[in-house]
Amino acid sequence: MDDIISCSPQREQRDVRCRRLLFRSWHRGTQESDFILGSFAEKSLDRLDSAQLDRFEALLDCADPDLFDWIVEGSAPPPEHDHDVMRLLRGFCATQRHTHQQNEQVPI
């Protein structure tokens, strides 16, 4: 029982942080960035560890055009943003595009 009580504040803190990151992801300023980052956040935040959340939060501090170039266009991000979370974002975006293209090819 003590373990549950001692973990509770940490879990609540993580939940608040994830909700804040989710909000920031969906409210970027451009619809493209909102959709990419918001969708990624919805599907991925629960699986990211604390260090990955730090890296994702640092990406949210970047300008939308830069993020779009790094994630969608495949431009090389600067070294401080070339990490596992960027690779996860790129993979997520590529999967979304592939799924979208397959759905467009389905005859009606």
Image: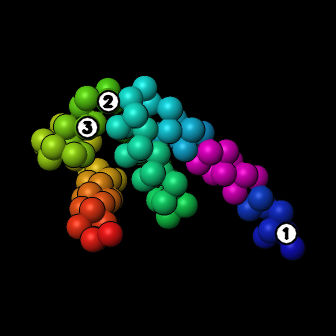
Q: Quadrant of the C terminus?
A: bottom left
Q: Quadrant of residue 87?
A: bottom left
- 21 sits left or right of 2 in the view: left
Of circles 1 and 2, which is in front?
2
**Label 2 crowd (10 A; few <14 / some 14-19 / many >=20):** some
22 or 58, which is in the foreground? 22
Q: Quadrant of the N terminus?
A: bottom right
Q: Position of residue 56 (x, y in %)?
A: 41, 45
- Residue name at image x 32 percent, y 26 percent: 63
Q: Earlier in the sequence, mark 1 or mark 3?
A: 1
Q: Position of residue 101 (x, y in %)?
A: 24, 62
Q: Is residue 18 magenta?
A: yes
Residues under labels 2 and 3: Cα distance?
A: 6 Å
Circles 2 and 3: CB distance less than 8 Å? yes
For disc 2, the marked residue is 64
For disc 3, the marked residue is 68
Of circles 1 and 3, which is in front?
3
- 43 sits left or right of 107 in the view: right
**Residue type for callout 1:** Asp
Q: Which secondary structure lies at badge 1? A: helix
Where 2 sits versus 71, above or below? below
**Label 1 crowd (10 A; few <14 / some 14-19 / many >=20):** few
Q: Which residues are magenta?
A: 9-19
Residues under labels 1 and 2: Cα distance?
A: 44 Å
